[in-house]
Image: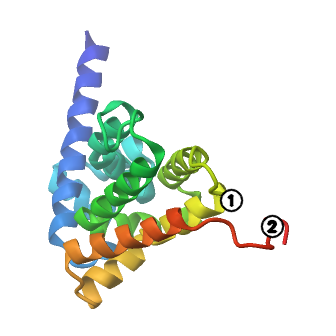
Amino acid sequence: MPDRKSRKDAARNREAVLAAADALFARRESPADITMADVASAAGVGKGTLFRAFGDRAGLLRALYEARLEPVRQAVEAGPAPLGPTTPPRDRVPALLDAVLCFKLDNRRLALALEESGSGSPYQAEHYERWHGLLQAVLEQIPGLTDSDFTAHALLAATRADLVEHLAGEERIPREQMRAQFANFVTRVLASGPLQGLTAEE
């Protein structure tokens, strides 16, 4: 019985921490200003509880990011068109990339904080590897399209959190305009065949 109670307490604390962190990132202009102490205070737990549950600030950011991403992940893995696995590849690729862009727009500060945290580049993050692997697999199903690995990287580069923040924040490009511009770019990439006279080795 004590073990069950402690697990329930841990789960309740985890939810409280994620909710508090979620609210803080929604309110603060600069994600770098939010500390583990801020989150612990907002959640009503000790800093030790926070570090035991998430390891460090990067671990907390990853957990919060994954919690927000879960509905998109479910739609991609088992949902209907246009995100689900039964969608034709040429329709699914633009839908997947639009979902990534919309998620970054809806979670600008959190995405920026996650990509700026830790010791490595955003390309080494687990969520990036999953998106890249998925896109590469779908791109490989499109006849005549070569270099699916590089193409997936290049398309995802247009959804980097720092670029999204620059376009949405500093340049103030409206959401729907940005989505339309990105969709046009993706369409052009998918419509273009390999350059004549060039091979992947060259």
Q: In this view, does 78 lie above or below 46?
A: above
Q: Position of residue 193 (x, y in %)?
A: 62, 65
Residue 199 quadrant:
bottom right
Residue 5 quadrant:
top left
Say the numbered circle drawn on residue 199: 2
SS of the residue at dot 1?
loop
Q: Name the residue under label 1.
A: 147
Whether residue 50 is visible, yes or no, is: no
Q: For this view, does 183 lie left or right of residue 138?
A: left
Q: Which residue is drawn at 28% across and 69% down?
A: 108
Q: In this view, does 144 lie above or below 9?
A: below
SS of the residue at dot 2?
loop
Say the numbered circle drawn on residue 26: none
Q: What residue type is labelled 1?
A: Asp
Which one is earlier in the sequence, the residue at label 1 or at label 2?
A: 1
Q: Which amino acid does label 2 sit on?
A: Thr
Q: In this view, does 49 lie above or below 146?
A: above
Q: Where is residue 158 in the image (x, y as percent from the top left)?
A: 45, 72
Q: Where is residue 146 in the image (x, y as percent from the top left)?
A: 67, 58
Q: Which residue lies furthest to the bottom in this view?
A: 171
Q: Which residue lies furthest to the top in this view?
A: 1
Do labels 1 and 2 touch, CB within 8 Å? no
- Quarter that holds the N terminus: top left
